[in-house]
Amino acid sequence: MLQSFDPFLIVKSISQEKLYAQGDTTTQAAELNAKSIHPLFSWWQTIQIDFQIIFERDPAARNWLEVLCFYPGFHALELHRIAHWLHNLKIPFFPRLISFLTRLFTGVEIHPGAVIGKGVFIDHGMGVVIGETAIVGDYTLIYQGVTLGGTGKESGKRHPTLGEYVIVGAGAKVLGNIKVGDHVRIGAASIVLRDVPSECTVVGVPGRNICRIPQPNCPLEHGEIPDTEATVIRTLVDRIERLEQLLISCQSK
């Protein structure tokens, strides 16, 4: 039902009729005219992408009505887009009011100044905090309890920049003016304080790059994330066993 209604198509048809009357029948001109008549068309298209991505990312999403009514992450994201629009217009008070009410009703706190791309999915949402100068790339997946914050009281750009298709696990903290590349996976409860190159998996406190991702779009399967500490311990145990065998063989001679 939602997907079948697109105000941009309506405005585009109106624009084409006007252009036909003026002797201009090019589609590109019609689209440009539609944009000037209906500035909210891109916002509506972004909402549609945000809505559709939920069904791709969350197997619990049964139908459109449940998503519209019971997904606080979706509510918080769309309310933020309104607050961000008002923030860009330099309108005082109301952007922060929307952000405050959003936090009360959804448990998600996003500063109106934060830049969030299309197709972002905030799963569950409770406890998510996104700072003023944070930038979140398209199609990023954020789980509950995530913080995209600063590390001090410095002014200017002080929050992280996330690339596209990033997955941030539950409870993870990404702090400071750092850059996280595209297709990065951040494990649950990790604390990331340094730049992360694209197509990496980051785990631990502080976060460490442990592997390259063979398939960038694969979901965050925590059971498949390597345990670096266990690997180091296993390596040391194997080395001790080899040294013991070597010592025994030397003693027998």
Image (tube, rainbow, N blue to C red):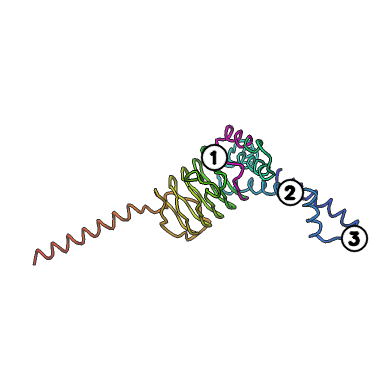
| Sequence-first disc among 2 and 3 | 3
SS type, badge 2 = helix
Residue at 24% of width from left, 60% of height from top?
239
Say which quadrant the N terminus sits in.
Answer: top right
46 vs 214, nearest the viewer: 46
Give neighbour class at mark 2: few <14, some 14-19, many 20+ (Cα, 10 Å). some
Residue at the far bottom in the pictured view:
253
| Sequence-first disc among 3 and 1 | 3
Q: Which amino acid type corresponds to the residue marked 3 in the rendered image?
A: Gly
Between marks 2 and 3, how big is the CA–CA gap? Answer: 25 Å
* Residue 182 against residue 145 in the figure, above or below: below
Residue 82 - label:
none
Residue at 79% of width from left, 60% of height from top?
28
Q: Is residue 246 magenta?
A: no
Q: Which residue is mark 3?
A: 23
SS type, badge 3 = loop
Along the horizontal axis of the image, is 138 left or right of 252? right
List x then y, in percent, for residue 155: 54, 46
Per the rendered image, the range of residues in magenta is 97-117
Q: Which residue is mark 2?
A: 41
Q: Which amino acid type corresponds to the residue marked 2 in the rendered image?
A: Phe
Q: Which amino acid type corresponds to the residue marked 1 in the rendered image?
A: Gly
